Image (cartoon, rainbow, N blue to C red):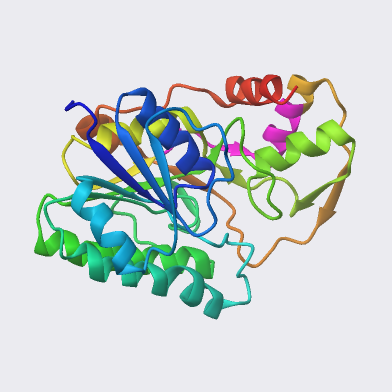
Amino acid sequence: MMAQQSILLIGGSGFIGRALARRLAAEGYEVHILSRTGTKSTDHPPGITEHLGDQGDSTLVAPLLKKCRHVFHLAASTTPADTVWHPAREAEQNLLPTLRFLECAQDYPENRYIFLSTGGAFYGDAALANEETPPRPTSYHGATKLALEHFFGILGQRHPGSLTVLRPSNVYGPQQPLRPGFGVIRTLLERARNGAKITVFGDGSAVRDYLYIDDLIDACLLAMDKPTGTYNIGSGKGHSLRDVLSMIEQVTGISLEIDHQPQRASDVQRIVLDTRRAREQLGWQAHVQLLEGLQRCWRASK
């Protein structure tokens, strides 16, 4: 690694972005975060610089793209639950700003672009989805990620070797912010802590693939130098919501009160990711099992 090599995180103020920035800085990189809101952190480790602004502002973005040879695109202003009935919000908050960024990025084809898409909201119901599984998003958020993969894909076609797409499953970990309708593990642990009733949409049989944040960050770093391509990044193991609730009771020693509600329109019954391609081409695999990850989160919150 070259000393002080510069890396740009577009939308680096969120949970994943902050974790990635800390790891990159610890590895000796010079990290630049571009965000509309900022991380609101006053104690960044050395090597991290924040830039406040919009990804579509070419006067701000172009100098950063010229300086930074690796660019992670993490920006997302919505969750699947935010836009269940509001497709226009996806266009206004996610799609159009990113397309404006791409207009600028196409002038810097020598960079390596790593787009964080989604595995959890992309495939629809799938027992074990690989990268060739036809996408069937059931939310406008997932449909936007699919559209953006195609737009980024044009950049990758025109400039081979410039683009990698990562499709992470349901990411969780310490320091994940509490956000309504998003981050089920973070929400469940908070409900356990304060004794609040837990709302479960459906009967609890829905299966998800949960990915610990450190494992995702490992994949991000490997993607910087390994072969470009599209990669599922997940644990490869499915756990029902009932399983997760049982594990949380085991970890916390707290009995949970459940309120069952009808399943939401944007929810799928089962999605687990096949990560064979990431193992073979990136040399990556998840190491933190769900029970261990829950224990880490619970300890960190005390």
Residue at point 65%, 67% (across, down): 265
Extent of the magenta region:
234-248
- Asked which quadrant contains residue 31, the reply is top left
Residue 272 at what x, y percent from top left? 47, 43
Vertical order, 234 against 159 (above or below): above
Residue at point 56%, 62% (across, down): 78
Residue at point 48%, 34% (across, down): 19
Residue 236 in view of the camera: no
Residue 192 at what x, y percent from top left? 82, 33
Q: Residue furthest bottom?
A: 88
Residue at point 35%, 66% (across, down): 148
Residue 182 at what x, y percent from top left? 64, 51
Q: Is residue 247 magenta?
A: yes
Residue 86 at what x, y percent from top left? 60, 77
Residue 273 in view of the camera: yes
Quadrant (top left/top right/bottom left/bottom right) for the C terminus? top right
- Which is more toward the observer, 12 or 153? 12
Quadrant (top left/top right/bottom left/bottom right) for the N terminus? top left
- Which is more toward the observer, 118 or 65? 65
In the displayed structure image, the side of residue 255 where residue 153 appears, left or right: left
In the displayed structure image, the side of residue 48 where residue 237 appears, left or right: right
- Asked which quadrant contains residue 89, the reply is bottom right
Q: Is residue 176 magenta?
A: no
Q: Across the whole image, how many numbered discs are drawn on residues?
A: 0
In the displayed structure image, the side of residue 216 where residue 39 appears, left or right: right
